[in-house]
Image (cartoon, rainbow, N blue to C red):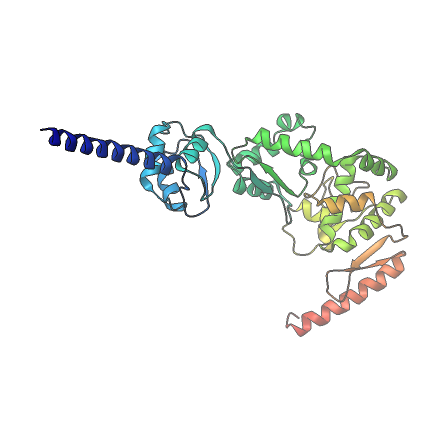
Amino acid sequence: MKKTLVICAAAAAILVFGAGLFVGLRYWSDNRAPGFRNPYTLFVYPDTECGAVLDSLICGADAVRKGSVERAAAREGLDGNIRPGRYDVLPEYSAVYVMRMLKNGWQTPQNLTLSGTIRSKGRLADIIGTQMMVDSASVVSALEDGDFLSRYGFTPETVFALFLPDTYQMYWTASVPEIFGRFKKEYDAFWTAERLALAERQGLTPMEVSVMASIVSGETLQASEYPMIAGVYLNRLRRGMKLQADPTVCFCYDYTLDRVLKKHLGIDSPYNTYRYRGLPPGPINVPPKACIDAVLHPDGHGYLYFCASPEFDGTHRFAATYREHLKNAREFQRALTARNRLNGNL
């Protein structure tokens, strides 16, 4: 009898130890152990069901133990309590930690990058909409809403100046007002006392600098030419000449022109710098920071004209007189005719 009791006690001890070990190992696997094999970026949209989120996480991050993820989700009461957001899941994260990320909204900042040629509000909205949770249509609406833009000191005509191409970090779930607010903060930071003083030295307001920079941006993709072209337009502006900038005419036609011809120059628009003197009412694109700085630091020269180089390398030839300009233009036209003939286009 005594021997039986000893055996039962030993068996009970083993069971308790085994149960404790099982519970301990489960706790460790759920709370402490690395829970995933792959890094994974999980995007959670509003009203996404918990099951769909867990399936995406388990498959995308290749969960080490599917059961750990499911237990952690149940323990944290995740069903109905997942916060929308962008979450970077690393292999060393435990299942419980990731569930708490989702429950508490511990998002990973998203990079929002503005780059390339941005000549329309639709294009700008698409760039933002593809990188953030907001719908591009809501961004377009904001870009056209004068009352909304007035909160930030802009109008539908001047709003391109608000957006300075660069990479910015913000939460993927940021609302349209939050996104615009961030760009206003960056705009204010960009316009330092030094830049404001340089703009005043050129006789321009910050907005006028942005407008001029957008014309420079429209003229060339060669960053090395930005200060030269900025100098040309500043020289024209100071002499009271019409700017006669082809990109402004292209803007009037929503950039649908392959070439600007004489028949296009008569369009009645305040953006047509062949018809009206001075700067147009607002930027004609989102100018790069380098173009803005080129207007603030233009090359000092006496050039008033420029035209495309006959080398077709994207550069331009500059001239101080109209006679010299006509010579450059004829050389370019002869080279263009020869190239078209060679290519069978004539």
Out of 269 and 230, give the one closest to the viewer: 230
Q: Position of residue 104 (x, y in %)?
A: 46, 28
> At 41% from the left edge and 30% from the top edge, which residue is drawn?
82
In this view, the residue farthest toward the left is: 1
Write down the quadrant of residue 239 in the picture. top right
In this view, the residue farthest toward the bottom is: 342
Write down the quadrant of residue 221 in the picture. bottom right
Is 272 above or below relative to 4? below
Write down the quadrant of residue 268 in the picture. top right
Q: Is residue 134 left or right of residue 58?
A: right
Out of 111 and 4, give the one closest to the viewer: 4
Is 124 above or below relative to 229? above
Q: Position of residue 51 (x, y in %)?
A: 33, 36
> At 72% from the left edge and 34% from the top edge, which residue is drawn?
189
Quarter holding the C terminus is: bottom right
Q: Is residue 8 left or right of residue 70?
A: left
Q: Is residue 37 left or right of residue 273?
A: left
* Figure label count: 0
